[in-house]
Amino acid sequence: MEFDDGAAYLEAFRFPEDSPDPERYYSFEHGNALFVALDTNQDVGAGSRQLGWLRSRLAASEHAWKVVFFHHAVQSSAPVDRDMQEVLVPVFEEHRVDLVVQGHLHFYERTFPLEGGAAPDKAQEPDYEDPRGTIYLVTGGGGGVLRSGTPDARTARFESRYHHVRVDVDGARLRLEAVDRRGLVIDGMTLEKTVAPPPPVFHRGDADPNGALQLTDAIRVLTFLFLGGDAPSCLEAADADDNGVLQLTDAVRVLSYLFTGGDPPPPPGPPPSPCGADPVGSPALGCEAYDGC
């Protein structure tokens, strides 16, 4: 083959090896975002190993943001690979992928959030709150001869201009900008989404609760009992000796464990707990607090 199946590229760079074909297609996580790279020079059709891996990787993710990127475009106002489009687009919609980044076409194009081929929230352009659908980006302005195109009803922005794209994710907000070679921002948009808070975690004796057993837990109990302080948010967790009553002995139990080598607070009772799940062998309390840790 002309390029020896990308041998020089793979020799020069190292990519994650978490797929059936390591480094060819892969994923990585950063903060609350999942990034998935596909190899569209390989088979991504129905029944392919790559498609099966993509489905499982997206289904297993609980990340707030999901971004998929690859070379050959499947959604654009220019001609695209219809076979890949028919296979991949439903997967992106099923698993609520936020952004799909594509290349191959030598221009810049950003769609509205698309769902079933329609743009149900286009009226929010360019600042979206919990939009329905996936945004498709073509960023092919890094080199080569620029091409023209014919934007259609799905297109939010089109530019036949050399450019690069920068994306910033900060918690529940994603900001995207396209910048031309003179440094001018030629497109920008934001996505805001409602991100569910992490589930509560139960730690016996953690009266704050901050996920760790510390001096502040004993202080919280004492302040509540004797100085009129606020009640711990979960009384069951603050009940360090697990006798069903919040009292001085709970603060003593925590202090004894922390500073005099006393017994650790007992493990949680049978689930479910109103304070959330308790991971067995929690490092916050020390493995000695749990059987079989």
Image (cartoon, helix red, strand yellow):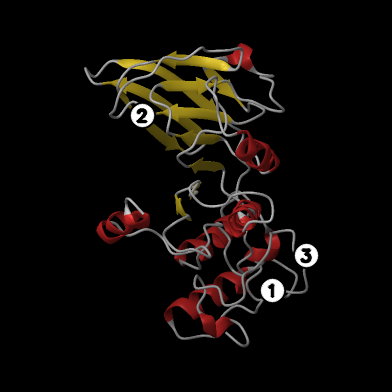
Residue type indicated by callout 2: Val
For disc 2, the marked residue is: 165
Q: Quadrant of the C terminus?
A: bottom right
For disc 1, the marked residue is: 268
Q: Where is residue 16 in the image (x, y as percent from the top left)?
A: 41, 60
Q: Is mark 1 on a helix, strand or loop?
A: loop
For disc 3, the marked residue is: 272
Q: Where is residue 238 in the image (x, y as percent from the top left)?
A: 63, 64
Q: Quadrant of the N terminus?
A: bottom left
Depth check: give the residue in front, 67 or 218: 67
Q: What element carries label 2?
A: strand
Q: Position of residue 179 (x, y in %)?
A: 31, 22
- Tell which tag, 3 or 1, sits nearer the viewer: 3
Q: Residue at x 64, y 49 (%)?
A: 45
Against 5, residue 218 (above or below) is below
Q: Mark 1: give few (<14), some (14-19) or many (20+) Cα within 10 Å.
A: many
- Tell which tag, 2 or 3, sits nearer the viewer: 2
Against 201, residue 282 (above or below) is below
Q: Mark 2: give few (<14), some (14-19) or many (20+) Cα within 10 Å.
A: many
Q: Could you tell which of marks 2 and 1 lies nearer the N-terminus?
A: 2
Residue type indicated by callout 1: Pro
Q: Could you tell which of marks 2 and 3 lies nearer the N-terminus?
A: 2
Depth check: give the residue in front, 18 or 126: 18
